[in-house]
Image (cartoon, rainbow, N blue to C red):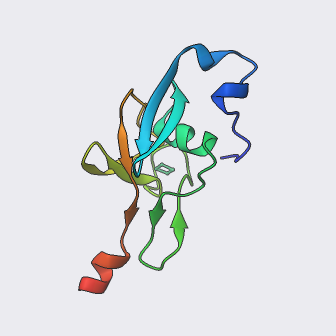
Amino acid sequence: MSSETIRPDIDPVGRADRPLRITVDGDPVVGVHGQTLASVLLADGRSHWRTAPTGGPRGVFCGIGVCFDCVATVNGIPDVRLCRRPAREGDMVTTQTRIAEEDAR
Ligand code: FES
């Protein structure tokens, strides 16, 4: 997926008339109704939101719900695929890491 996603405030199509607000690790992020959570995060300039056991950053890879690279915790529910989840007003996204889990074993 391209990192050249158009931010809602400069979208020439005018979709900014339907904004929504979410939080990502406590930071406010603005999106547009109809976007997936992954597209909201990409438009905010975030390329990854999960850390693999190897320490590598993970975000959107397939973009169609197959690879599970894009998972994060949404409203307390872990391992939600952000490329498949429509963004909703007030969603709380928390980034995930597997490093601590692997170290604990
Ligand atoms: S990017 Fe592959 S499942 Fe979301």
- Name which residue lies at 67% across and 33% down: 7
User: Looking at the image, which is closer to me, 26 or 14?
Assistant: 26
Q: Position of residue 78 (x, y in %)?
A: 28, 53
Residue 87 picture location, percent across and down: 43, 31
Q: Is residue 45 above or below residue 19?
A: below
Looking at the image, residue 87 sits to the left or right of residue 31; the answer is: left
Count up the numbered dots: 0
Q: Position of residue 33 (x, y in %)?
A: 49, 22
What residue is at 36 percent from the left and 72 percent from the top? 98
- Nearer to me, 29 or 52: 29
- Quarter holding the C terminus? bottom left
Q: Would residue 33 be seen by someone viewing this image from the given angle?
A: no
Q: Residue 31: x, y in percent?
A: 53, 30
Q: Residue at x 47, y 38 (%)?
A: 37
Q: In the visual, does 31 lie left or right of 3?
A: left
Q: Quadrant of residue 86?
A: top left
Does 46 sit left or right of 65 as displayed?
A: right
Q: Is residue 42 visible?
A: yes
Q: Is residue 5 above or below residue 34?
A: below
